[in-house]
Amino acid sequence: MARVIELHKSVTESNDKDADQLRKELKEKGLFLINLMSSPGSGKTTLLSRTITDMKPEVEIAVLEADIESDVDAERIEALGAKSIQVHTDGMCHMDAGMTRAGLEGMDLSEVQIAFLENVGNLICPAEFDTGAHKNVMILSVPEGDDKPLKYPLMFSMCDALVITKTDTMSYFSFDIKKCIEHVKKLNPDVEIFPVSAKTGEGMRDWEDYLKRNMAAILG
Ligand SMILES: Nc1nc2c(ncn2[C@@H]2O[C@H](COP(=O)(O)OP(=O)(O)OP(=O)(O)O)[C@@H](O)[C@H]2O)c(=O)[nH]1
Ligand SMILES: [Mg+2]
């Protein structure tokens, strides 16, 4: 059974201030935190599972799973031998910095270099709250369609990287990746984009290099 923590909305003066403080503390502790955001079912846990397996000998990864209910995702991560904790958000559609801190405090992270926050699945509220992560990564899966940047511009504008998952299904969904990237780059010219299939392994290497490169840059 995965450990589950029930969280409530943080009552603080400023989420942005809390987030900056958390970011700084995590860096001092040698922990690189990534906030992963997407629609439900885009392939976050599958991507994380493959990333953990591929990087395991080199980098220790932990996952903070945020959901409104259940502990299935934390159990999937623990089954791989990685540290994970499930937090419930009391019905809220996002995580804030105080909630992220409380979730991280529930795990022993002394041996861990990268922690992922798998945020609550939706493309709206998580984009509005700084969690204290060093990088914000968005996932868009091929079955959702190449027009999503037009409908959810804030999420696509604020992310540091975009992972386009389930690329093995591209031909079934008439997904025009060139058009999708054009829409995204108009909103966010500096975003790094990684087309990936966690099923076939295609593109995983570039995504994992991105993680290693940023881990080295942030942790020094
Ligand atoms: N074909 C294909 N299917 C995938 C891929 N990645 C994930 N899936 C499937 O997509 C479904 C959802 O995957 P999850 O990893 O649970 O997605 P999630 O974003 O963690 O879902 P929530 O946490 O519920 O929001 C599962 O049936 C996966 O097997 C992929 O690269 N290719
Ligand atoms: Mg999941």
Image (tube, helix red, strand yellow):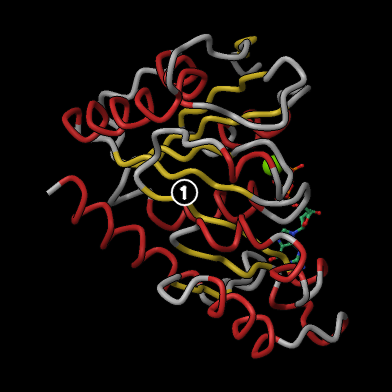
Q: Can you tell me which quadrant of the image ligand 2 is in?
A: top right
In the rendered structure, the answer to whether residue 82 lies left or right of residue 198 reads left
How would you rate the neighbour count of disc 1 (Cα within 10 Å): few for under 14, some for 14-19, many for 20 or more?
many
Which residue is more in the foreground, 91 or 79?
A: 91
User: What is the total number of numbered labels drawn onto the structure image?
Assistant: 1
**Left or right, 211 with reference to 119:** left
Q: Residue at x 59, y 46 (%)?
A: 127
Residue closest to the eye, 198 or 100: 100
Residue in the picture at 46% in, 14% down: 102
Q: Residue at x 33, y 24 (%)?
A: 109
Residue 58, position as x, y percentages in the image: 28, 51
147 or 83, which lies in front?
147
Image quarter hosting the N terminus: top right
- The residue lying furthest to the front in this view is 13
Q: x, y percentage for residue 19?
A: 38, 29
Asked which secondary structure carries label 1, the reply is helix
Q: Is residue 43 above or below residue 147?
A: above
Residue placed under numbered mark 1 in the picture: 52
Above or below for 38 versus 84:
below
Q: Amino acid at mark 1?
A: Ile
